[in-house]
Image: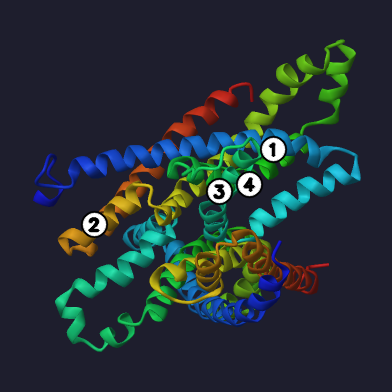
Amino acid sequence: MELLAFGDTGWGDELFYATLMTIAVSITAMFIGFLFAFLFTPLKLSKNKFLNFIANSYTTIIRGVPELLVIYLFFFGGTGAVMFVASIFGYNKYIEINAFITGAFAIGIISGAYSTEVFRGAIQSIDKGQFEAANVLGLNKFGKFFKIILPQTLRLAIPNLSNVWQITLKDTSLISVTGLVEIMRQSYIAAGSTRDPLFFYSFAAVLYLLLTFVSMKLINRLEVKYSRGY
Amino acid sequence: MDLELMINSFPKLLNAAVITLKLLSVSLIIGLFVGLFFAILRLNKNIFINRFAYGYSYVFRGTPLLVQIFIIYFGLGQIEYLRSTFLWVILKEPYWCAIIAFALNTGAYTSEILRSAFQTIKPGIIEAGKSLGISNKIIFYKIQIPIAIRQSLPAYGNEIILMMKGTSLASTVTIMDLTGVAKYIISTTFKPIEVFIVAGGIYLFMTFIIHNVIKFLEKKYSFN
């Protein structure tokens, strides 16, 4: 237990901040994923074959390639890409991108592919009559989407989005390979310096279980809220 | 685009893909038995056995695979007692540690898939078997298991693909699988995009094959 003491003698405070970092990365990644989903879901549902093809390639490639490989692509490729863009604007010095941003972006793109599929499924399962009714009421495009379609989509999407959240949360453990100090990385450091890997990795597992447990409870509440009309 | 690098690295990555497939197939076979075992425990009416099986699947589904590999590879070696038993022969090899972690992980998901498949079997089918005078054991092995396998094929196909992506984590415990070799080539040449295209292409090809095999099996074993 003294290994977990707060302050200089133990790893308690370090692991606490690492847990906050995991939460922060997960939420950021989930949010980036939503942005991707809002971009690609309309493309998936569009009647245009070419737009369909773009969206399908995105979800197929991301869901068919290991997360770790995507993270390596961003970790090793991110700096190069940013420096290339900077060199166009005449800035030729070395730029290092923050591990948080690379990690959140990589996980966000992965999470976005899953979210896109969830939203596509949810929108497709909304009754055609709802779209027609909205048209009959004379709502414009925005009103139709935000007042009629989106609330119903959310109700259908939340159970599946909670799966995406779980996947995203667990995927953040892979960012530890880039050196971002989240739960996994901190446990690795602690295990290395105390030579007690069994304890620290088990404790990391407990932290992840706690995070999934608490977030499931919160999401269940959200689910109840959005299905109150049913 | 460095086409030469892509062509040169292709055979290396293809060789590494064989290791990925080996890891995948061995862990899937062990995981299937683990999953079946725990699915049967989940259907048991004894609350302790039931809770134990639920706890197993909850823990393995609620924690990242990376943590599980690290606990088995780095953590278990720390227990002095284990080092003196025959288990150490297995646990000192990163290859077997990875397989144990993968098998336990996919076993947890498989047990959930099989459990829900068993639970959706209509009671009428089992009653029909009973009324024909078939023993409970044979009903289980000859009626319930085949139906459950058919029911769980789509979900199990997804699990196979997820597991194939999961094997990439073997590279974190020094195994040179497809991702491990890809990372090695990236870090020596600093050409991440080219290597990603080749390695990702191989992964996608494997996903494509698995997807179609499962689709074929689904059609073959469909009820109508």
Q: Which residue is mark 2?
A: A200
Host chain of mark 3: A
Please state which of the two labelled residues, at mark 3 or mark 1, is closer to the viewer: 3
| Foreground residue among A118 and A174 | A174
Q: Quadrant of residue A141?
A: top right
Question: Spatial distance from mark 3 to mark 2, Cα to Cα?
Answer: 31 Å
Q: Is residue B32 left or right of residue A193?
A: right
Please state which of the two labelled residues, at mark 4 or mark 3, is closer to the viewer: 3
Which badge, 3 or 1, comes first in the chain's sequence? 3
Q: Which mark is residue A114?
A: 4
Host chain of mark 4: A
| Foreground residue among B4 and B10 | B4
Question: Spatial distance from mark 4 to mark 3, Cα to Cα?
Answer: 22 Å
| x, y percent for residue B224 | 83, 67
| Residue at the (90%, 39%) spot, across then down | A47
Q: Quadrant of the C terminus of chain A?
A: top right
Which badge, 1 or 4, comes first in the chain's sequence? 4
Q: Which residue is mark 3?
A: A78
Amino acid carrying label 4: it is Tyr
Amino acid carrying label 3: it is Gly
